[in-house]
Amino acid sequence: MALLLGDTVPNFTQESTDGPIDLYDFFGDGWGILFSHPADFTPVCTTELGAVAGLKEQFDKRNTKVIGLSVDDLASHRDWVKDIEETQNVKLNFPIIADADQKVANLYNMIQSEDNKMTVRSVFIIDPEKKLRLTITYPAATGRNFAEILRVLDSLQLTDGYKVATPANWRDGDDVIVLPAVSNEDADKLFPKGYETVRPYLRTTPQPNK
Ligand code: BEZ
């Protein structure tokens, strides 16, 4: 069955480049991102894993651990990591799951074609309660925009921490939207910088954590 937003994600143990991984233990009390790529030794994937390694400081700032996956085996992952590090000028600083038996890929529906047993480019953002908060799926030939994934993490963490939503094309530092479920009376207390009522259902306020 497909995983839906708000579901508790299934736990698993599987081999990885950092040894056997239990997903829940690996994410601990923080946020987590599980993402798959189609195959080792492919060009787009090589750039993607290099890009994710280069964002470690950004993920750390957001209390978020990342973990990659494909259905290649551990020996292949280990060989490929050397290429990623050499060509992308990074040290790989997160594990890659070696899902050769497709256990995790099937659990998370990462294989989407009978003809092609490679995993698609899936992303799962998982919150500290192990609830699924975002899924995106990209095709094999399109590398992901990891700045967008950081932007969504920021939005999710703002929603949880401050009862705000983020508008279209929001960027860190822009005004945000008071959640419709918050009454004006509560908004007066929650948003000391004030808020503008554009419509009763559309109230904007400066980003609270700035
Ligand atoms: C790539 O990572 O470059 C790739 C993988 C599978 C199909 C097409 C491109």
Image (tube, rainbow, N blue to C red):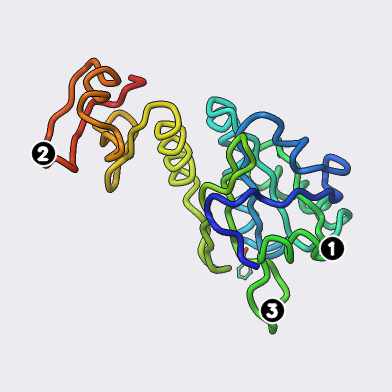
Image position of 112 with respect to 128: above or below: below
Using residue 112 as the reference point, say whether residue 105 is left or right of it.
Answer: right
Residue at 21%, 17% (x, y): give it.
193
Q: Amino acid at mark 2?
A: Val
The residue at which mark 1 appears reads as 100
Splitting the image into four quadrants, where does ligand 1 fall?
Answer: bottom right
Q: CA distance from mark 3 to mark 1?
A: 15 Å
**Other-residue count near label 3 (Cα within 10 Å), few / some / many at <14 / 14–19 / ≥20:** few
Say how many tags the image has.
3
- Which numbered tag is attached to residue 116? 3
Q: Are marks 3 and 2 in contact (CB under 8 Å)?
A: no
Look at label 1 and name its amino acid: Ala
Callout in the foreground (1, 2): 2
Dot 1, crowdedness within 10 Å: few (<14), some or many (≥20)?
some
Using the rendered view, name the quadrant where residue 44 is placed. Answer: bottom right
Please tell me which residue is depicted at 57% across the width and 48% down the height of the picture: 132
Q: What residue do we see at 48% from left, 45% from top?
A: 149
The CA distance from mark 3 to mark 2 is 49 Å
Q: Quadrant of residue 197?
A: top left
Give coordinates of residue 136: x percent, y percent.
51, 58
Ranked by sequence position, the earlier of labels 3 and 2 is: 3
Crowd around label 2: few <14 · some 14–19 · many ≥20 (10 Å): few
Label 3 is placed on what type of residue?
Asn
Name the image quarter holding the C terminus.
top left
Distance Cα–Cα, label 1 vs label 2: 53 Å
Q: Is residue 56 above or below residue 8?
A: above
Disc 2 is placed on an element classified as strand
**Residue on which disc 2 sits:** 198
Where does residue 91 sit, x and y in percent of width and height? 70, 36
